Image (cartoon, helix red, strand yellow):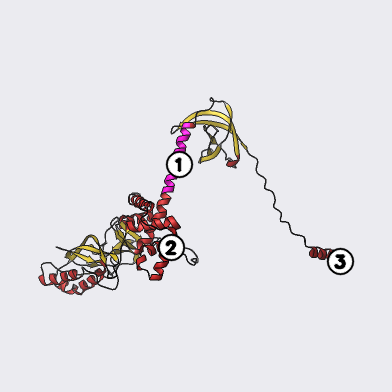
């Protein structure tokens, strides 16, 4: 068993070369398998001094490439933390196992080396299968390690696939770096959706957050005039992706999304998978950049929860039991709201909660709803009980009557038409003619 680092751009070419040897392998009754053990990223500098990150697969060679194919349902984009599911048929429910499975061809039970595999579905048998891109028919290629001649010839293909060769290849982006740029853009311009997600015509000059992040992150690649324009945009707002707040926000957001365990939401799960990698590619950039708004939404929800908890604690400290059981009282309401309602054996029940000026809490189980809750100024009722809920003292009232504030009358707004002497004279002449 030998280990090779294969540049991702060479897998397609490697598979084709392997296919040309399939007949010889079959004649020898041998097999060749290779297993992807992991990924490595390396930073290179081109002739223009530009740095870029390339991806390599760490491959243990012991067998051969495998193929199989069915009708397309979804693309599985494989990552360390799971799979990003792209463009699947929404009428079908994707089985849970395909959200975390490795790049295996289920037809021939061999591990693929590509970044993507594809999910196919048979309408007759109702069966899902995970297959490779070129797996259109069943065949097996291979070479036995014991057959020296074939062994050497195929290993040469792996040796030649270690470096980059070809017109283009994926350039990867450091997740933490690009997230800092995303938060700095969010600070100055907010979050703008991608063009594809907009309904109707896209406004002239519209720039999504993903586009803006890409422009600034790759500013060195821009043409001189574009680079000057982009730099001016950044200078006008004091753009600094390494600012203290952008670094702190990016760090906290990545820690939050990577630590999420409840991944039932498909968007959050995809974001979690992409953000958990050290590097990402351009097609995943749009999802990653949306971490800015997802994280700030989380912070807002957290702040609202903390405010609610603080209010509850303040209520506990302020609220005391009022009066005695069976006392009839009238409460001047500071606030009045329906906190719950339900349908029971005797019809609907409405639970109202209100407080007085001292912060004492009252509750009332009513059999009918109160209209215009915001107009309630006082409640008359009989004290039924003194209860306590989660440490909050509550005075329970029954047989209540509410007093509403009078409605505000809206004055009609009249539109005064300026006098027109000529029009008035013409109308007078016309009426005189009719009455003559």
Picture quarter with the N terminus: bottom left
Mark found first going from the N terminus, 1 or 3: 1
Q: Which mark is residue 100?
A: none
Which is more N-terminal, label 2 or label 3? 2
Q: Position of residue 319 (x, y in %)?
A: 49, 31
Q: Which label lies toward us, 1 or 2?
A: 2
Q: Does residue 315 show up magenta in the picture?
A: yes
Q: Which mark is residue 307?
A: 1
Specify the segment rendered in magenta. 299-317
Where residue 153 appears, as percent x and y from the top left, is 14, 72
Is 203 included in the stretch rendered in magenta?
no
Helix, strand or loop status at disc 3 = helix
Task: Kindly report the distance in space between the C-alpha atoms of the residues bearing marks 1 and 2.
Answer: 38 Å
Q: Is residue 123 visible?
A: no
User: Between tags 3 and 2, which lies in front?
Assistant: 2
* Residue 233 tag number: 2
């Amino acid at each position: 068993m030998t280990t090779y680092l294969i540049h991702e751009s060479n897998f397609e070419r490697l598979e084709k070369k392997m296919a040309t040897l399939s007949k010889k392998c079959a004649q020898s009754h041998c097999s060749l398998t290779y297993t992807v053990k992991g990924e490595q990223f390396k930073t290179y500098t081109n002739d223009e001094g530009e740095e870029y990150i390339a991806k390599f697969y760490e491959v243990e060679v012991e067998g051969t490439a495998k193929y199989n194919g069915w009708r397309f349902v979804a693309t599985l984009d494989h990552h360390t933390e799971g799979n990003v599911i792209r463009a699947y048929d929404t009428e079908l429910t994707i089985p849970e196992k395909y959200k975390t499975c490795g790049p295996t061809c289920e037809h021939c039970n061999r591990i693929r080396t590509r970044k993507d595999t594809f999910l196919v579905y048979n309408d007759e048998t109702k069966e899902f299968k995970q297959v490779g891109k070129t797996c259109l028919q069943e065949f097996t290629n291979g070479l036995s390690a014991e057959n020296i001649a074939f062994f050497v010839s195929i290993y040469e293909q792996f040796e030649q696939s270690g470096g980059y060769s070809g017109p283009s290849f994926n350039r990867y982006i450091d997740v933490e770096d690009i997230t800092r740029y995303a938060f700095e853009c969010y600070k100055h311009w907010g979050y703008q959706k991608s063009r594809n997600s907009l309904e109707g015509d896209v406004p002239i000059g519209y720039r999504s957050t993903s586009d803006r992040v890409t422009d600034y992150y790759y500013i060195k690649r821009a043409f001189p005039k574009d680079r000057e324009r982009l730099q001016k945009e950044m200078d006008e707002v004091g753009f600094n992706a390494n600012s203290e707040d952008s670094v702190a926000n990016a760090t906290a957001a990545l820690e939050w999304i990577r630590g999420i365990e409840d991944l039932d939401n498909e968007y959050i799960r995809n974001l979690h998978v992409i953000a958990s990698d050290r590097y990402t590619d351009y097609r995943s950039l749009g999802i990653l950049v949306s971490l800015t708004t997802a994280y700030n939404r989380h912070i807002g929800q957290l702040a609202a929860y903390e405010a609610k908890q603080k209010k509850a604690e303040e209520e506990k400290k302020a609220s005391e039991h009022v009066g005695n059981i069976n006392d009839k009282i009238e409460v001047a309401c500071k606030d009045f709201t329906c906190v719950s309602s339900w349908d029971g054996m005797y019809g609907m029940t409405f639970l109202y909660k209100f407080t007085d000026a001292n912060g004492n809490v009252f509750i009332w189980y009513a059999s009918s709803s109160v209209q215009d809750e915001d107009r309630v100024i006082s409640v008359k009722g009989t004290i039924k009980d003194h209860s306590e809920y989660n440490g909050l003292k509550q005075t329970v009232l029954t047989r209540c009557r509410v007093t509403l504030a009078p409605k505000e009358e809206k004055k009609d707004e009249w539109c005064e038409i300026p006098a027109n002497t000529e029009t008035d004279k013409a109308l007078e002449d016309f009426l005189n003619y009719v009455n003559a």
